[in-house]
Image: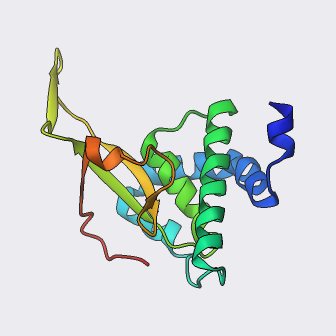
Amino acid sequence: MIRKLMQLSAWQWLVMLGSVIIVPYIYSCLRLCGYKKTLNGVRSADTARSGLSAGDEAALAKQMAYAMAVAVKFGFWKPNCLTRSLALGWFLGRRGIPFEIRIGVPDGVLSTFSTDGPTFTAHAWVESSGVVLNEKEDVASEYSPFESGLDKHS
């Protein structure tokens, strides 16, 4: 484990250490302001492209997603998928990497029933240039993503 940590890039360390502040911040924003305002706030910093080649940009995005996964796995904060995805988007946006937050429902199931009544089930993940970053690559085969109704950001 120590060897893997020593091999992390500077951006990965930035994501891991920064997640201690960003994840609770995103969580609070979601609770206080809602999804649309939080997403707009996350995207507001994504004003200029990274200047990297498409391949380097994709590699950096994957490295940042890996660092976020490590931070969540070993951190004291266990955020839900939407909070994790928005936090990753925050880091990507600050590096100028375009991203999309995808939200989907399980194929064929819009709600499940429990003793408390029907519940809505959904899952969120991040894509950059059509590549899934913080989830299995075939997540869209398990969940049907729907359009957010928000302006596309590229």
Q: Residue furthest top?
A: 115
Q: How is the image coloured?
A: rainbow
Can residue 97 be seen in the rendering of this structure?
A: yes
Q: Nearer the viewer, residue 154 or 115?
A: 154
- Residue 32 coordinates in the image, percent (x, y): 44, 52
- Image quadrant assignment for residue 76: top right
- Image quadrant assignment for residue 39: bottom left
Q: Nearer the viewer, residue 21 or 51?
A: 51
Can residue 76 be seen in the rendering of this structure?
A: no
Residue 33 located left or right of residue 53: left
Q: Residue at x 66, y 64 (%)?
A: 60
Q: Residue at x 53, y 61 (%)?
A: 89
- Residue 143 coordinates in the image, percent (x, y): 26, 44
Residue 109 located left or right of residue 13: left
Residue 32 located left or right of residue 148: right
- Up the image or down, 123 lies above or below 30; here it is above
- Up the image or down, 141 lies above or below 42; here it is above
- Residue 16 coordinates in the image, percent (x, y): 72, 48
Quadrant that contains the N terminus:
top right
Quadrant that contains the C terminus:
bottom left
- Residue 120 coordinates in the image, percent (x, y): 21, 36
Q: Residue at x 76, y 48 (%)?
A: 17
Labels in figure, total: 0
Q: Residue at x 38, y 56 (%)?
A: 34
